[in-house]
Image: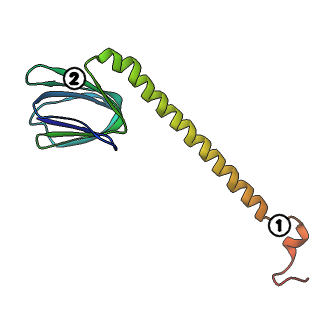
Amino acid sequence: MKLVVVTPLEVVTTVDDVAHIRAEDPSGSFGIKPGHAALVTALAISVVSWRTRQGDELHCAVRGGVLSVEGDTVSIATRKAVIDRDLARLENEVLARFRGAAEESARVRIDEERLRAAAIRNIQRLLQPTYPALAARPAGGRA
């Protein structure tokens, strides 16, 4: 089985002799072996692990993304990816950094929505007539 991990800027890894992959989506963790049915799922911020046929085990922290299985190829497209043999380091350091960045992005989106709503309210207020007498005037000017 082949594994390909890509970010918008690079191909992080391509491994041709994968025996097993473990990943996590919002519903929980799952495994993929050669011959797996076609699949597309959104990944959580998590660690994807794989074992080669030679027995080497590697791990890749991903900042969410999409995992797809087509034929004998598993593809992962993610915003950021960090590969390491040390699973504990990835889980403790890298995932914490990814989660912090995701939380900051969520805060920024909320602040942007609040600013947008405030701007719309101000525009609506400015478009309303200031004087009740102006609102009662017929179209065309003079009463």
Dividing the picture into quadrants, the one containing residue 137 is bottom right
Q: Are circles 2 and 1 on residues that touch, CB within 8 Å?
A: no
> Which image quadrant for residue 98?
top left
Check the picture and name the quadrant holding the N terminus: top left
Q: Out of 9 and 3, give the one closest to the viewer.
A: 9
* The quadrant where residue 112 appears: top right
Q: Secondary structure at mark 2?
A: strand
What's the residue at 22%, 23% (across, down)? 58
Q: Is residue 108 left or right of residue 125?
A: left
The residue singled out by tag 2 in the image is: 58
Tell me the mark number nearer the camera, choosing from 2 and 1.
2
Q: Nearer the viewer, residue 135 or 61?
A: 61
Residue carrying label 1: 129
- Assess disc 1: are there few (<14), some (14-19) or many (≥20) residues with their C-alpha within 10 Å of its C-alpha: few
* Chain-order first, disc 2 or disc 1: 2
Q: Amino acid at mark 1?
A: Pro
Going by the numbered disc 2, the residue's amino acid type is Leu
Q: Secondary structure at mark 1?
A: loop
| Pick the front one: 131 or 14 | 14
Q: Is residue 16 left or right of residue 86?
A: left
- 38, above or below 53, in the image: below
Residue at image coords 33%, 39%: 78
**Residue 130, percent across and down?**
86, 64
Residue 26 in view, yes or no = no
- Image quarter in which the C terminus is found: bottom right
Query: How is colour applied across the structure in the image?
Result: rainbow
